[in-house]
Image: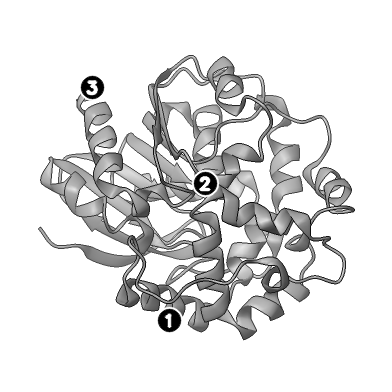
C-alpha cells in the first residue's frame, strides 16, 4: 500500500492530507516543528494492520495554507478544521492521535465535537488542569528568570526572523535538544531577555542520528526553508484565545477511550509540575493505559517507532 497526498479545500483553507490504508480512520495530528511526514513510521504500519491512516499538514505547516493572522489558529477554528476533514472524507467518526500542539488540540476534541471521536491516542503532552491565569501572563512571569520559548514565540517578528534565517541550524538543534530532557533543560539556565532560541539551544552533532537519517532531516529543512515558521509560531500566539474559548468546557471529563504515550526522557513531562500523569488521570476517566518509553524524548514516535506502533495497534484492536 502506498501513501497518497491530496490537497483538500475545507474550512476556508487548502489542507494537504496524506493517507494510507483502508478501514476505520485514524487521524494523526502533528505539532511544532512537525509535518504529516512526522508520522512516516506509523502510516504504513497502521495501513498494514487494516486501518485508514490520515495525516494532515496542520494549518500553518507544509503544503497546507498558512494564514498570517494568529486569530486564525484559535480553538474554534482548529477544531473546525478536523471536523471539516472528516466531512470532506465522508467519515462519521475517527480515532485521533496528537503530538505536541496536535495533542493540545486533540485533548479538546471530545469537549467540542464528542460525536466525531472514537478514541484518543495522545503523545508527549498530558492533559493539564485549566490555569486561572492566561498563558501569556504565566509565560512572561517565568521568562523573567529563564529562557522560555513559549514566551519568546508570543511576539511576532523576532522569532520568525531568527528561525527563517537559519532553518537548518534551528531544526537540527531543536530536534536534538528535545530528544532528551537533560539536553533541553540547558535552555532553562539562560534568561529570555536579549537571547534568541539559537543562543540557548545546545549544539547538535552531525547527522545521521540513531533515529533520524540525513535524507529525513533534509525533508524538514526543505519544507521549512520554503514556508518559514510563521504558521507554526501562530499556534503559540493563539494560546490566549484558546484559553478563553475553552473556559466553558474545561470541567468536562474525557470519557472516550484513551491511551497516553511519551518518552521517559521527554522534557515536557519535567516542565509540567510534580505529577502531570496523575493530574491527567483525574481528568480522563477514559484513560486505559500510559506508556512511558525508556530512552526516548519528545519525538517518541520517531525515536522508538516499533514500541509506539505496538502500543497503538494494541489499543486500536480494542476499538474495532
Calculate the distance from the C-alpha at mark 2 to the C-alpha at mark 3.
28 Å
Do the numbered discs 2 and 1 sit on residues whose CB atoms are within 8 Å? no
Q: Quadrant of the C terminus?
A: top left
- Disc number at residue 314? none
Under tag 1, what secondary structure? helix
Calculate the distance from the C-alpha at mark 3 to the C-alpha at mark 1.
39 Å
Q: How many marks?
A: 3
In this view of the protein, can residue 278 be seen by the observer? yes
In this view of the protein, can residue 33 be seen by the observer? no
Query: Where is residue 315 drawn, in percent x and y?
Result: 27, 27
- Disc number at residue 80? 2
Above or below residue 20? Residue 46 is: above
Residue at image location 15% in from the left, 46% down from the top: 22
Above or below residue 131? Residue 49 is: below
Q: Earlier in the sequence, mark 3 or mark 1?
A: 1
Query: Where is residue 69 drawn, in percent x and y?
Result: 69, 65
Calculate the distance from the C-alpha at mark 2 to the C-alpha at mark 1.
29 Å
Which quadrant of the structure image shows residue 208? bottom left
Q: Is residue 69 found left or right of 27 in the rendered image?
A: right
Residue at image location 29% in from the left, 60% down from the top: 18
Under tag 2, what secondary structure? helix
Query: Where is residue 292 drawn, in percent x and y?
Result: 42, 33
Which quadrant of the structure image shows residue 128? top right
Residue at image location 66% in from the left, 70% down from the top: 68
List the residue tagged with mark 3.
318
Amino acid at each position: 500500500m502506498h501513501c497518497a497526498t491530496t490537497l483538500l479545500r475545507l474550512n476556508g483553507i487548502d489542507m494537504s492530507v496524506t493517507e494510507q490504508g483502508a478501514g476505520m480512520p485514524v487521524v494523526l495530528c502533528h505539532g511544532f516543528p512537525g509535518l504529516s511526514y512526522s508520522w512516516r513510521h506509523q502510516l504504513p504500519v497502521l495501513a498494514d494492520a487494516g486501518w485508514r491512516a490520515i495525516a494532515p499538514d496542520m494549518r500553518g505547516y507544509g503544503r497546507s495554507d498558512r494564514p498570517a493572522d494568529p486569530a486564525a489558529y484559535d480553538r474554534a477554528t482548529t477544531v473546525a478544521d478536523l471536523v471539516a476533514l472528516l466531512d470532506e472524507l465522508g467519515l462519521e467518526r475517527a480515532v485521533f492521535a496528537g503530538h505536541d500542539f496536535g495533542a493540545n488540540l486533540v485533548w479538546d476534541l471530545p469537549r467540542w465535537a464528542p460525536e466525531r471521536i472514537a478514541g484518543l491516542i495522545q503523545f508527549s503532552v498530558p492533559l493539564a488542569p485549566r490555569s486561572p491565569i492566561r498563558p501569556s501572563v504565566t509565560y512572561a512571569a517565568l521568562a523573567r528568570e529563564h529562557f522560555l520559548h513559549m514566551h519568546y514565540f508570543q511576539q511576532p517578528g523576532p522569532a520568525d526572523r531568527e528561525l527563517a534565517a537559519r532553518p537548518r541550524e534551528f531544526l537540527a538543534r531543536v530536534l536534538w535538544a528535545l530528544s532528551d530532557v537533560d539536553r533541553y533543560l540547558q535552555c532553562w539556565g539562560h534568561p529570555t531577555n536579549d537571547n534568541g532560541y539559537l543562543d540557548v539551544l545546545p549544539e547538535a552533532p552531525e547527522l545521521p542520528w540513531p533515529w533520524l537519517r540525513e535524507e529525513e532531516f533534509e525533508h524538514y529543512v526543505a519544507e521549512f526553508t520554503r514556508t518559514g515558521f510563521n504558521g507554526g509560531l501562530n499556534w503559540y500566539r493563539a494560546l490566549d484565545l484558546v484559553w478563553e474559548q475553552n473556559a466553558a468546557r474545561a470541567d468536562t471529563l474525557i470519557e472516550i477511550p484513551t491511551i497516553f504515550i511519551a518518552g521517559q526522557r521527554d522534557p515536557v513531562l519535567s516542565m509540567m509540575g510534580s505529577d502531570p500523569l496523575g493530574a491527567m488521570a483525574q481528568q480522563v476517566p477514559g484513560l486505559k493505559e500510559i506508556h512511558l518509553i525508556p530512552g526516548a524524548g519528545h519525538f517518541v514516535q520517531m525515536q522508538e517507532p516499533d514500541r509506539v506502533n505496538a502500543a497503538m495497534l494494541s489499543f486500536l484492536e480494542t476499538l474495532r
